[in-house]
Amino acid sequence: MDNVDLNVLRQVVAWRDAGHTVVLGTVTRTWGSAPRPVGSVVAVREDGQIAGSVSGGCIEDDLIARMRAQALAADRPQVVRYGVSGDEAARFGLPCGGTLELVLEPLSTASQVEPLLARLVSGERVRRELSLSTGEVVLSAAEGSADLAIVDGEKLISTHGPGWRLLIVGAGQMSQYLAQMAQALDYQVTLIDPREEYTDFERLPGVQYRQDMPDDAVQALKPDAHTAVIALTHDPKLDDLALMEALNSPAFYVGAIGSRVNQAKRKQRLAEHFDMGAETLERLHGPVGIKNGARTPPEIAVAILAELTAVRYGWRIPEPVFTGTVASGAEAGCAT
């Protein structure tokens, strides 16, 4: 469940606390093109107020009309499909040939939405098992990466919480900005810094903190293909240890802050002291982030997350060209 859908859950809890009746819709399957991915959610309350989206708006309008007309099942979940025919696809604003399946779930105490939200806010990954016949829900700790699925027409099993992990070495100001922004992009964030002088600061909710040595921490956290590791301390004694472990893992992104000169020196150190080959070192991103003139910590954090997003989706960003034109009040930035 990404951060957008987490906000839907927050709204659902607020509505229920205020005494409203709420139906939660979850995209369970799609055929052809679809405006939102499987797992996306929409919530509708009895007066037609809506949170979230599963289409360009037409399906939401239909759900609102059904809710106001009390045409949705109030005692158990139901499965509905939109866009089965070409005419329906056009009516509901789905792309040509697109079909969308939703599970519509009338919420009650048995839905366990409030406990689910509390666990997600704390940074947990949670497995939710919904009985389609009774509406009863069982929550448990999620293990591994599990896809949403309807099992034997009886249960809807979904995994909620961050689908990606970001391990940040260094707990300085830039790391704080990066951690905060990354959570909005569906990352479970861990900050790693053994230095005593970086322990006395306000900790961000949902972020995990570790004070062991970076190589030990990275090794313990076992980066997988959904993990990015970024070193931001500027201290080779810390950064290099983390990078050594990360480059030997399946992590989809490994990077470090610093200039191109520092990047060349870093690769040389890793080759000489840790016997890393050219193919392995080719995986190391640096200077970390897209080149966009960023110079302040939040700007650099944006540049880093832009590159992470591109790599996640298989895009290669070409080398940008400085035009010499700078917005009023700004100065040309430095490479990260």
Image (spheres, rainbow, N blue to C red):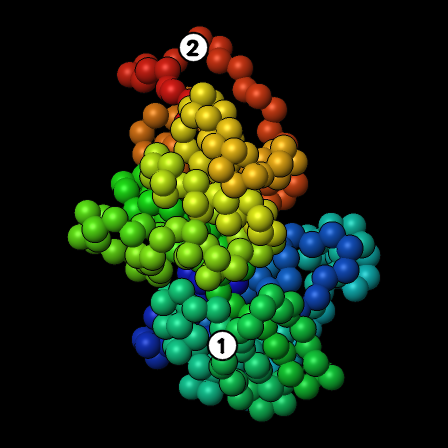
User: Considering depth in this image, is 45 or 335 the residue closer to the camera?
Assistant: 335
Tell me the quarter of the picture where residue 32 sits: bottom right
Tell me the quarter of the picture where residue 19 sits: bottom left
Height in image: 138 above or below 207?
below
Height in image: 112 above or below 60?
below
Cβ atoms under marks 2 and 1 closer than 8 Å = no
CA neighbours of label 2 inside 10 A, class few (<14), some (14 to 19), many (20+)? few
Instruction: Where is residue 216? Give x, y as percent.
Output: 42, 56
Instruction: Where is residue 14? Give x, y as percent.
Output: 34, 70
User: Considering depth in this image, is 55 or 69 the residue closer to the camera?
Assistant: 55
- Left or right relative to 250: residue 21: left
Height in image: 294 above or below 170?
above
Give, as a three-letter code, the residue at label 2: Thr
Q: Which residue is mark 1?
A: 141
What's the residue at 63%, 78% (across, down)?
156
N-terminal of the pair, mark 2 or mark 1, is: 1
Q: Is residue 45 visible?
A: yes
What's the residue at 36%, 43% (across, down)?
238
Residue farthest along the bottom direction in this orientation: 134
- Which mark identifies residue 123? none
User: Considering depth in this image, is 284 or 252 the residue closer to the camera?
Assistant: 284
Closer mark to the observer between disc 2 and disc 1? 1
Callout 1: SS:
strand
User: Considering depth in this image, is 123 or 158 the residue closer to the camera?
Assistant: 123
Q: Which residue is mark 2?
A: 325
